[in-house]
Amino acid sequence: MNISLSEAAPVVSPTSGDGVLSLLWLIPALPALGALVILVLGNRRTSPWAHWLGTATVALSFLIGLVAFFQLLGRDESDRSVGQHLWTWFEAGSFTVDLGILYDPLSSLFVLLITGVGSLIHLYSVGYMAHDAARARFFGYLNLFVAAMLVLVLSDGYLGVFLGWEGVGLASYLLIGFWHHKPTAATAAKKAFVVNRVGDMGMVLATTLMFATFGTVSFEGVSELASGASQTTLNILALLLLLAACGKSAQVPLQSWLLDAMEGPTPVSALIHAATMVTAGVYLVVRSNFIYELTEVGRTAVVIVGAVTLLAGAIIGCAKDDIKKALAGSTMSQIGYMMLAAGLGVAGYAFAIFHLLTHGFFKANMFLGAGSVMHAMDDDVNMRHYGALQKAVPVTFLTFAMGYLAIIGFPGFSGFWSKDKIIETAFGESLWIGLAALAGAGITAFYMTRLMIMTFLGRKRWEPGVHPHESPKVMTIPLIVLAALSVLGGVLLLGDWIVDWLTPVVGHAEHHELPLPVIAYTLIVVAVVAVGVAVAWLLVAKRDIPREAPQKVSFVTRAARADLYGDAANEALLMRPGNNLVEGLVTFDDDYVDGVVDGTGSAAIGMSGTFRRIQTGYVRSYALSVFAGALLVVLALLAVNLG
């Protein structure tokens, strides 16, 4: 699609809210209050009711967000931006940082996703974590996670975003390592925390550079002044923001933490992958459109990162036997689609957010469905030990199937509409970018069909003593709601609604005719998806699935099992050189710095020993010394006079 890009959309000066819009501060405050109450009172005191308090606070935030959304919807397009000053955060001379809220078409969609899907995940967790001794603390952490993400998307400037950014990082560390008695969980939490700190440096440096260049870090201020900055400054800003986005959204080269993060409880995986953490990077890039529209270098870098990650994540998903890790590879890939779309500029911003929303529906559905399968299989995550579960867990199977059809892009389901628009836009930008996006669709169809076959179809491969059973209603009701959203999410595209809704934030793109008719691209994508499904059927369904993974496999399969050697690359490029540097500094400190200090001390000790012999403390010795000195003086005077 040849698209002429409009100028970057300026951030509209916010107007004050009325009605529910004046209560926007309650949206992050309610889950934050829930977290405070639960965590301060402690697990033991709050265990009888903490799960209901945590769920209720997020549900109330959703209701406020829903009413606020309809109030915003009723306004004119030019008036769909509401600002609220909360308080002055800090002052340093003439520099003042105010903490405020910006509620506009972009943040309103994120609020609904975070609180809506977050409420369903909280409700599901009531059943999933029912027998966990620390369930109350878990809900406190969940509330903290949701509150931090809401601060991130509702802030009116980069410093407020950074506050939520770090809160999300802290909450993810606490939740990924929630079962910290397991060494793997503790290690995964530390890994996620460390890798995200690398990305966070991009956020810190970008915010600092904005202040040094523009004298402000508010969206409105940076948007107004960005066109006056040098091209070099804009390029650096775009790359630093991309580095930050790669950390939170698990994009290459900062993707290595995401698959290990599956060590946390399954509701955490759903929350991270569908509604909170990994969407933060996409939000940052789209929110910063006024910077990226001014730098071709920045947009190109985003497209490259997105294209590489969507293929890498899909390939990884093909070789995973752990159901959660297969879905985690899928998340990497789908976020890659969103980043690619965001890198296409004003032509792709709306489609990036559209796919982010539909992905939130079907990925939360499938992660919670995976948790339901684990619940039925005594927490076994190995798909080679599943099979023939469609009758044992019929609700889980049917709802998971809706998510499966959505993610592969089956016609009519939500992913069909959102992912196809990204692929079309990619072909309009470049044949090679379009082919990468198209290949990702085919690979997605393969690994997701493989997952469905290994989990629900074929023969039983269950461990002895396992008796699969359907999850309780408190877990299946969220699955049913998310399955419905997975089917119906495409309605957001009717009449180009989501494009028009986001135009005041991301700008307007004039669409021109594609080299081929739109229906031709649709048929091509559907054909590629069908090939992926057929290949999976031939290679998986038509063969016996061994209960142990074969060891003699191709290089590509070995690489995919090893997460495309991401950890090995980090070890070779960062960890070992870092260790060698530290060891070298320790050696230098021991041999040279300590040598100088110790040598100085030894010299002082030697000198003091010498002086100690002179200062004996005996009066007669001092008298003899005085007499000898006086005698020498007398003799010297006589010698001078006689001379």
Image (tube, grey):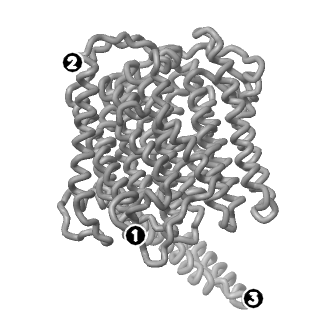
| Residue located 40% across and 19% down the image | 346
Q: Which residue is mark 2?
A: 516
Residue type at tag 2: Leu
- Seen from the viewer's position, the closer of residues 284 and 410 is 410
> Counting residues from the N terminus, which is met first, the one under dot 2 or under dot 3?
2
Residue 370, percent across and down?
A: 48, 56
Q: Which residue is mark 1?
A: 587
Q: Is residue 276 above or below residue 323?
A: above
Dot 3: few (<14), some (14–19), or many (≥20) neighbours within 10 Å? Answer: few
On screen, residue 579 versus residue 284, left or right, reads left
| Residue located 71% across and 23% down the image | 84
Task: For mark 1, give the secondary structure.
Answer: helix
Residue 515, percent across and down?
A: 20, 16
Image marks 2 and 1: residues in contact by CB distance under 8 Å: no
- Seen from the viewer's position, the closer of residues 540 and 492 is 540
Residue type at tag 1: Thr
- Seen from the viewer's position, the closer of residues 577 and 198 is 198
Give the numbered dot on residue 619.
3
On screen, residue 247 versus residue 319, left or right, reads right
Residue 352, percent across and down?
A: 42, 29
Examine the image and state in which quarter residue 237 appears. top left
> Counting residues from the N terminus, which is met first, the one under dot 2 or under dot 1?
2
Task: For mark 2, give the secondary structure.
Answer: loop
Q: CA distance from mark 2 to mark 3?
A: 112 Å
Residue type at tag 3: Val
Q: Is residue 124 above or below residue 632?
A: above
